[in-house]
């Protein structure tokens, strides 16, 4: 960057003022450490993840810690959220009898992913934690380990691999091809796509919000003000759309987790 250019965070960077458009990019997803302890760097995304965890724990503790027969407002909201995941996701995929034991985990997973997404539109935070691949990958790894454990627990070692690879003698000559495809699909590709689907949506959504937010400010100069209004409207519309996508991605992430557990518990492949 030349000396006469203005950095993206400087407030005097506008069109016709001698600085280029401070376009968002990979640098928008990197943060300086807030502090370092023994070589371990603690940054903004880690802080948001911890705050999100605390919020989810506090919410359900406040809602159900002293549950009443006649629920208060917070308990009603908590029950609605809990029941939404239990009936709309877990019971639909696993059934009431098999699914009940997995409800607490799926509810926790849903609300954790949702709050990690929601940070994107919350003032001051303004960053979706799940747009950093390490977080979706970590969550997908937890689901993957649970799926593998349940598969081999319910089917045994040989039966587990048959379940994973879709082994069926009736397939005849194409059996080796099917087994190979299913192995790579389930063992390697499945956890990758589970993580990337969430990461990619949050990454792209944050970039779009940044583009139009920065664009609105950048155009506030001279004739550019007319275009700044259009950019501002797009920012509002994208924020509303992103709010919808954040909930959808939490829903899809948990829905896939439920489907994986269902496959592990199924008697046949």
Image (cartoon, helix red, strand yellow):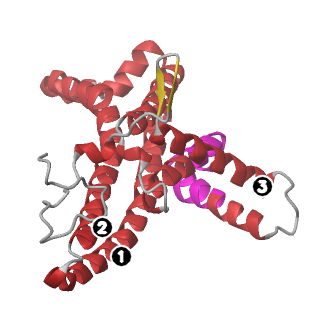
Mark 3 or mark 1, which has the lower sequence index?
3
Mark 1 secondary-structure assignment: helix
Mark carried by residue 236: 1
Which residue in the protein does label 3 denote?
A: 62
| Of the two numbered discs 1 and 2 in the rendering, the one whose residue sits closer to the viewer | 2
Q: Is residue 44 left or right of residue 202?
A: right
The Cα atoms of the two marked residues, 3 and 1, are separated by 32 Å
Crowding near the residue tagged with mark 2, few <14, some 14–19, many ≥20 C-alpha atoms within 10 Å: some
Residue at 87%, 54% in the rendered image: 66
The answer to whether marks 3 and 2 mark residues whose Cβ atoms lie closer than 8 Å is no
Describe residue 11's horizontal placement relative to residue 255 as left or right: left
Q: Is residue 185 left or right of residue 149?
A: left
Q: Residue at 66% across / 65% down in the picture?
A: 80
Depth check, front residue: 3 or 258? 3
Quarter-of-image position of residue 242:
bottom left
Q: Which residues are magenta?
A: 82-109
Where on the picture, by quarter, is residue 31? top left
Residue 32 visible in the current orientation: yes
User: Residue 211 at what x, y percent from top left?
Assistant: 24, 62
In space, the residues marked 3 and 2 are separated at their CA atoms by 36 Å
Residue at the limit of the structure toward the front, as seen here: 3
Q: Secondary structure at mark 3?
A: helix
Q: Nearer the viewer, mark 3 or mark 1?
A: 1
The N terminus - image quarter: top left
């Amino acid at each position: 960057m030349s000396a006469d250019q203005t950095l993206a965070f400087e407030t005097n960077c506008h069109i016709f003022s001698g600085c280029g458009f401070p376009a968002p990019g990979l640098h928008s997803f990197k943060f300086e450490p807030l502090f370092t302890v023994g070589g371990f760097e603690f940054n903004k995304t880690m802080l948001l993840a911890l705050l999100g965890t605390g919020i989810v724990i506090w919410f359900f503790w406040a809602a159900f810690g002293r549950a009443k027969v006649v629920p208060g407002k917070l308990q009603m909201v908590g029950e609605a959220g809990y029941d939404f995941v239990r009936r709309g996701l877990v019971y639909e995929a696993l059934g009431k009898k098999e699914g009940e034991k997995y409800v607490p985990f799926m509810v926790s997973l849903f609300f954790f992913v949702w709050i990690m997404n929601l940070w994107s539109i919350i003032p001051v935070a303004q960053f979706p934690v799940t747009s950093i691949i390490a977080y979706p990958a970590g969550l997908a790894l937890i689901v993957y380990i649970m799926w593998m454990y349940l598969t081999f627990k319910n089917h045994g070692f040989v039966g587990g691999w048959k379940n994973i690879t879709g082994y069926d003698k009736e397939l005849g000559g194409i059996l080796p091809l099917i087994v190979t495809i299913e192995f790579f699909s389930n063992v390697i590709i499945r956890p990758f796509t589970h993580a990337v689907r969430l990461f990619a949506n949050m990454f792209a959504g944050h970039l779009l919000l940044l583009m139009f937010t920065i664009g609105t400010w950048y155009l506030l100069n001279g004739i550019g003000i007319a275009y700044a209004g259009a950019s501002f409207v797009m920012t509002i519309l994208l924020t509303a759309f992103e709010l919808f996508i954040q909930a959808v991605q939490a829903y899809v992430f948990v829905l896939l987790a439920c489907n994986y557990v269902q496959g592990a518990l199924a008697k046949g492949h």
